[in-house]
Amino acid sequence: MTVNLGTDSRKITTPNGVMTTLASPSQGSAGQAVWRVDARPGMVGPVHAFDAELVWTWLDGAAVVELDGERHEVTAGDTMVLPADVSRQLVADAEHGFVSIVVAPAGAQVYNPGGVSEPDACDLAPKDSERLVPPWVR
């Protein structure tokens, strides 16, 4: 058994918000990665895909999730199961942003569905056809 104290959580700031790793292979030897997303108000996330299923639960705020071209509005209390290898983009509520908990298999990789990076992609994003494990999933 491992206890991960909140004071020891790994926090990674991105242009869109803060990712806080709650459990992962490198933090608590977990077989699943669990992280908290604190998205900035009005944040427009990059178009991306994961090679594994992710479960998102919204704790606060609201978002629009574009999943394979279909628009879904979510608010606090909602949960979405996002299938593997499906294009997605999240847009946070303009006034409040959102707070979510996300669960994925350890080692889940993110990638650009079209194999091309967005021109303004941050340093943590995969480049072109690269696949990588985000730092908050490691």
Image (cartoon, rainbow, N blue to C red):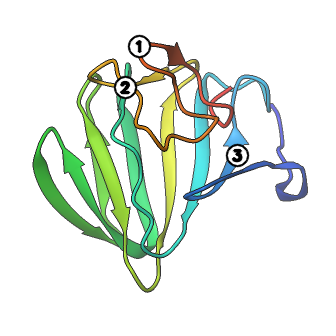
x then y, percent, for residue 72: 17, 59
Residue sitting at the far left: 70
Viewer-side residue, 61 vs 2: 61
State the CA–CA distance, disc 1 to disc 2: 6 Å
| Neighbours of disc 1 within 10 Å: few (<14), some (14-19), many (20+) | few
Q: Name the residue under label 1.
A: 129
Question: With 42 as the anchor, is 121 left or right in this view?
Answer: right
- Image coordinates of residue 114 in percent, x first then y, are 26, 22
Q: Which of marks 3 and 1 is nearer the N terminus?
A: 3
Horizontal arrangement in the rendering, residue 95 relative to residue 124 (left or right): left
| Residue density around tag 3, few if under 14, some if 14–19, many if 20 or more, within 10 Å | many
How far, Cα to Cα, is label 3 from label 1?
28 Å
In the rendered structure, find residue 79 and report the number of the disc placed on it: none
Q: Which residue position is annotated with label 2?
A: 112
Q: Mark 1: which secondary structure?
A: loop
- In the image, residue 110 lies at what x, y percent? 46, 25
Element at label 3: strand
Residue at the image point whose x is 11% and y is 44% from the top: 69
Q: What element carries label 2?
A: loop
Seen at 60% across and 54% down, the residue is 36
Are there few (<14), some (14-19), or many (20+) residues within 10 Å of tag 2? many
Quadrant for the C terminus in the image = top right
Placement of 134 over or under 78, stated as above or below = above
Residue 76 seen in render: no
Q: Which of marks 3 and 1 is in front?
A: 1
Residue at image location 35% in from the left, 73% down from the top: 62
Numbered disc total: 3
Quadrant, the N terminus = top right
Q: Residue 22 carries which label?
A: 3
Amino acid bearing label 2: Asn
